[in-house]
Image (cartoon, coloured by chain):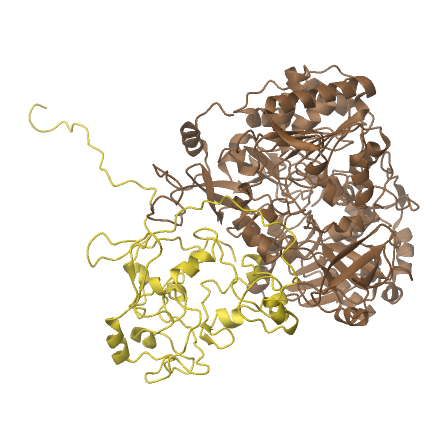
Amino acid sequence: MTGGRRRPSGRLLFGLYLVASGGVAVAAGVVAVARAAQHPRSAPPGRTSVELLAPPGQPIRAEADVFRTHAGVTAIPPGGERQRDAHPRTLARFRFLRAYPGAPPRIPHGFTADEFRTGACNTCHQRGGFSPRFDAYVPLTPHPEMPACLQCHVGRDEVTGVSLPSLDPSTVCRQCHAPGAARWAEALVDWRPMAWPSRAQPGQAGGVPSITHDLFFRGNCLACHSGPSAVAEIRTSHPERADCRQCHVLPDPTVNEFIRPIPGPRGRGEGS
Amino acid sequence: MTELNRRAFLKSAAVASAASVASTFVPAVAQQAPPEGTQGHLEELRWHRAPCHLCGVGCGLLIGVQNGRAVAARGDPDSPTGQGLGCVKGYHAVQTLYGRDRFTRAMIRRRGVLVAVPLAEALDLVSRRLRETLTQHGPEAVGVYGSQRWTIPDAYVAAKLFKGGLGTNNVETSARLHAGSARTGLETSFGLDGAIGCYEDIDQADVFVLWNVNLAETDPVLFSRMLARKRSNPAVRIVDLSTRTTRTSYPADESLLHLPQSELAIANAICHEIVARRWVRKDFVDQHVAFKRGKIQIGSEVPDGPLVEEAAAAATWDDYVTFLADYSPERVRGMSGVSPARLRWLASLYGDSSRKVMSFWGANVNGSIRGTWMNNLLYNIHLLTGKVATPGNSPFCVTGLSGLGSGVHDGGASADALPSGVTGNAEDRRRAAAIWKLPADAISSRPGHHPLGMFRALERGDLRFLWIQATNPMVSLPNLDRYRRAAATPDRFIVVSEAYPTPTTDVADVVLPAAMWIEREGIVANPERRVQHWDRLVEPPGDAASDAWHMVEVARRLGRGELFPWNRERHVEQIWEEYRRFHQAPASAVAPLAVLRAQPGVQWPFERGRATERRYNTLQDPSADPKRGAFDFYGHPDHRAWIWLRPYQPAAESPDRAYPFWLGTATVLEHSGTGTLTQRVPTLHRSIPQAYVEIHREDARALGVRSGERVRLVNRRGALELQARIDYRAQPPRGQVVVPTFDEGLLIERLTLDAGCPLSGQPETSKCAVRVERAGSGSGP
């Protein structure tokens, strides 16, 4: 596959199969409405506060129509159990894992030796759903077609890094009882990355926010902007609308405003 | 340090750079507040092209620059090298500029301690000591050891100063140390260095055979490209033929383990099978191939003096068939550990005329006492089957780091080379002297020291002044303790140009702060012969300047300024124009700077506005004469490629009763070279903070060792204690242990051997013998 090909966003049916394992979170319309009055706020430091549609990890009623199992059943049945998400994805956590806007995120969880060697990441990250192993909803990759995940996404060192529980018995104790700090005196980096985009404010009340990132590897909107594993602050209220880019456009910030050049005299009219 | 003020610089960079891609690529930020820590006016974020410098692929990147700092990196979708993809090193390459312990001032060692001084004072001292050494000991007592990470202009300035200005050929780089056999392999098989095919062959091949190269970690973007090729055509086959199981093995269709060194026999066995099954492309061989025997008893020592010169004796087809009789799959089974059935199957992939085959190999093949021979043997397979120089049929050597463009475009920075030609050829010397406006006899015909020879000369006292640039020999030289002692010998003067403190700067008498990568304009070439240019995108910190500029300053102080009449702002452009005069012949011509600026990399040979994708192919290569048929191997006087009769010979040091394990070394994805740059990136460092030893589960059990516990590796040269890892990133088979080389805190090269290929000078770092014991038990070293 050649890079640079923009993936069409908003395919008519997202084709995402959620596995309802061990209980499914509830998205009863009643519950959603009742909670609408109390949605939590999340404020990245120094920025405007953002109203969340739902607490992190809680599904949204509209998502029930979008995410279906391959048997056609809605994957978020009303009346089911709410799943406790021990690691809700917030914008702060999202940014913490990336060296700068657009950088590939670090892997925040441990994994078994087998998974590490074979890079079997898509087993979970292409399908999503709730992972009892990590007590969290699995974030979806917007680019499952790239198979060599570990080329760009690196993990914490499984012996000295603190991460979610690993199942490898030779490392589980050493999550906390590490045999000693890494030899290298951790060199500090004087790193001043560019600012994260502010949640793009629409030009008028009720207007539509623009896309704040390019679409290379990130053309699949629903993978990140919808679902219980979506970053809470950027979760869309209307995932059932299939063509995102009908309303949300991608402006080129280096282009100046349109200014029509003043035409010269036309040789008509009075005095010509 | 620069005449331009920052604002004017940013403007000129934005305007002058044809690589600023505003309209076709939208940066990642639409609206923003000023970044924390900056004040005042927020400059617009702009993206500029630059090749990554952290591995041997040479991916094209786009670097986001804002307020005079590099803040982000993306793959350049227009780059034919990376095709918009990067790897974790490339994405974090911008952070390598900003480690806090960066050298920003020149340092002089006074009473054992490095002390910051004005740059002019350090340059004065360097020049004075250089002049004194020349006067007292002559030109053979000085030398410069540069880097695969050098740009071509850096290398060219070094060659011009030392070879032209000072009359010594002691100019070498770490390219020879890590990829020397790749060069001599090509020179013996084809008469010329420089890859035959290109990365685009990956998109066309039907079969990939990986010869002991962990492509997933050494060249990740090429690995992804290979997987993409497989995904696009399910009939594609990937064979991982290796001494251990790695990340590369898992997506392969077949993973074949073989014993170290036996690849020599396996390659011959494949040729044996190709001949026996009549899979030989007879018409190709008759028209384009000659058979040669070389020197057989060349030993396993890299000579202190000049390298062994090959001598070719003609051989016939019948000689070759007789030679191959020793390498039937049945006979090779024992020494290789690969079954005859599997060897035959491998041969059938090469022999199948309907399938295009690409072979990859790298440091594990090259870093062997028979590295040159092994390169020849791999080319032999492709020559027997006629699978060379056409799309998808590609024997391809990856070389670890890209920067200097192999022995053709290394600027003249090898002991026996000039910017074009060799020091041993009178006509080449005259041409160089004429271009450099020097007397005809100014350039010495005596070859200089290769890298190991240079450090041995330092040890003996034949070399007294050594300038080391952008490389870390006090970590990367094999049999390291010997050369650490050499560097510590009194009455030697060592200058190190570097960006960060390393064990090499720890032995320096003077440290010059180096400008890195996008802090200076540069031109490099990658293994597929693609020359890439980048502008200076950010200013270097403090007094840092490019290696080339430091050498120019020293030259001026020595009164040789007339050789370097360049101005600081345009010196790269001026160097390139001068350099191109050495490469007028179409076989090595490079594109002019204007073309390099306009495109994300242009391959050489570049002739009449066209870049050459595949050499020796008369349809693609302007130097190939169509009257000779579909191919013209113009590197040799007989216009043929040569199949060399190369036998199997054992490694310099194999396991024995005292030291029963093979020790190998390895590259990891996250780190480049000895980790000088990549260790300073938090994401990369935390991902793999220290080296370890990979050991098989059963071997560990026999030693009573569990994963994470410490073991000691002991051999004839030293001992090292480190952490064992079982079933971690890669698994060696029983009887082998492997240690990655990125960690300056765990100097594995203290245990490796400085035996090597006598033809190339590249040491055998891929294998030696050790004993493994639990730490805290057993005897000492």
The total of numbered circles placed on residues is 0
Residue B640 drawn above or below residue B127: below
Q: Is residue B153 visible?
A: no
Q: Quadrant of residue A5 in the image?
A: bottom left
Q: Is residue A257 visible?
A: yes
**Residue B499 place in picture, x, y as percent:** 61, 37
Residue A257 drawn above or below residue B464: below
**Residue B200 place in picture, x, y as percent:** 60, 51
Q: Quadrant of the C terminus of chain A?
A: top left
In the drawing, does residue B317 fall left or right of residue B40?
right
Q: In the picture, which chain is yellow?
A: A
Q: Residue furthest front?
A: B111
Residue A116 drawn above or below residue B144: below
Residue B281 drawn above or below residue B593: below
State the residue in front, B643 or A82.
Answer: A82
In the drawing, does residue B265 fall left or right of residue A121?
right
**Residue B107 place in picture, x, y as percent:** 63, 30
In the drawing, does residue B309 fall left or right of residue B360?
right
Q: Quadrant of residue B416 in the image?
A: top right
State the residue in front, B254 or B270.
Answer: B254
**Residue B344 place in picture, x, y as percent:** 79, 66
State the residue in front, B674 or B733.
Answer: B674
Q: Residue furthest left?
A: A270
Q: In the picture, which chain is brown?
A: B
